[in-house]
Image: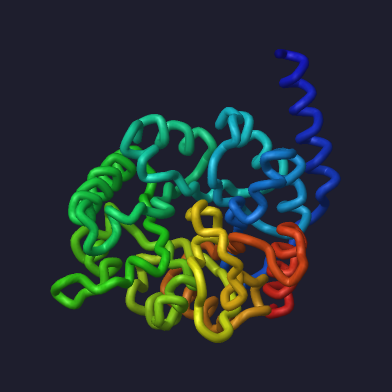
Amino acid sequence: MKITKIFAVIIAVAAAVSCGPKKTATEELPVALQLYSVRGDLEADFLGTLCKVSEIGYDGVEFAGLFGYEPAQIKHWCDSLGLVPISAHVPLAEMLADIDKVIADYKAIGCEYIVVPYVTEERRPNGELFLQMVEEIRAIGQKAKEAGLVLLYHNHDFEFRKLENGQCGLDYLYENIPADLLQTELDQCWVKYAGYEPVEYLQKYSGRSPVVHLKDFYLQGEQEGDPYALIGLNENEKKANTAFEFRPLGHGLQDIPAIIEAAKAAGSKWLVVEQDNPSMGKTPFESVQMSMEYLNSLK
């Protein structure tokens, strides 16, 4: 076991040296990668994947699982590679089962934020457990605050469903949980896909949007099938989807420069690139590199 740990340390140090200097994609805001974008690579080679992320030029990472590694080891790797571990997507069920462990693990890594990434149908607006979920998130936010972390909520499109009072479910969530217990992580793809303007939503939650998900997409004609099949969430939906696909930044329909400027004006601290699945014949790593190259072209 000791030999394994020593070997891992040697690899991490060597990787940090080989990755070379990093670039900053924007003048005011650092850019992280949501590691879900390269989940297959992480599963095959966690440390090697982190090194590639650093080499491409990302300033930080947002986790979507630890793949069996200990928090202390992951912190060491991030420190060695100069990657800031800013946040983590943690399933709501995992938080409800043992929020103390979730907080302890991600504090040990050095994360500032933990994020509710997705909720199941019964907890969505007008679902039988929606109001219960609001209180669950309030309680988690309180625990996070007491521990020195900040809880975020990452939206999809279904949070924009209207409640009986005509209010969007997402707005109800933020109206009924105070900002000191819950901040936004506005996913700009899903805001736009739901029929709203990303810039306007960033303006609406100015001062409450520390982390912004940059995600581009392409949509042509009528949507067929379930877009969540593309991100592996609905395993029963395997229908080919030719109308919708995720794209590298700058290769889809989003006005990325306008979103970045709105994020700056809203007081955001981090931009997070996410591409749930590759497209355009590219691999996941080619996709996230294309996004970084696009961001660098905006300087």
Residue 7: horizontal and vertical position, in percent?
79, 23
Residue 204 falls in image quadrant:
bottom left
Q: Tell me if I can see residue 269 in this picture.
A: no
Q: Disc count in the image?
A: 0
**In the displayed structure image, the side of residue 234 where residue 54 appears, left or right:** right
Q: Residue furthest left?
A: 165
Up/down of 17 relative to 55, above or below? above
Q: How is the image coloured?
A: rainbow
Residue furthest toward the bottom? 221
Residue 178: x %, y % from top left: 22, 58
| Among the 4 quarters of the image, the one containing residue 95 | top left
Picture quadrant where residue 297 is located? bottom right
The reply to whether residue 126 is visible in this rendering is yes
Q: 284 or 24, which lies in front? A: 284
Q: Nearer the viewer, residue 28 or 184?
A: 184
Q: What residue is at 51 percent from the left and 74 percent from the top?
A: 224
- Residue 175 shown left or right of residue 160 in the figure: left
Q: Position of residue 34 (x, y in %)?
A: 58, 55
Q: Left or right: 243 with respect to 279? A: left
Residue 45 at x, y = what percent?
Answer: 74, 39
User: Split into 4 quadrants, where in the image is the N terminus?
Assistant: top right
Q: Is residue 187 left or right of residue 67?
A: left
Q: Residue at x 35, y 52 (%)?
A: 120
Q: Nearer the viewer, residue 217 or 291?
A: 217
Quadrant for the C terminus, please. bottom right
Q: Which residue is at a point 58% across and 84% down the rendered structure image?
A: 220
Q: Is residue 46 above or below residue 73?
A: below
Which residue is found at the position 81% from the left and 49% from the top? 19
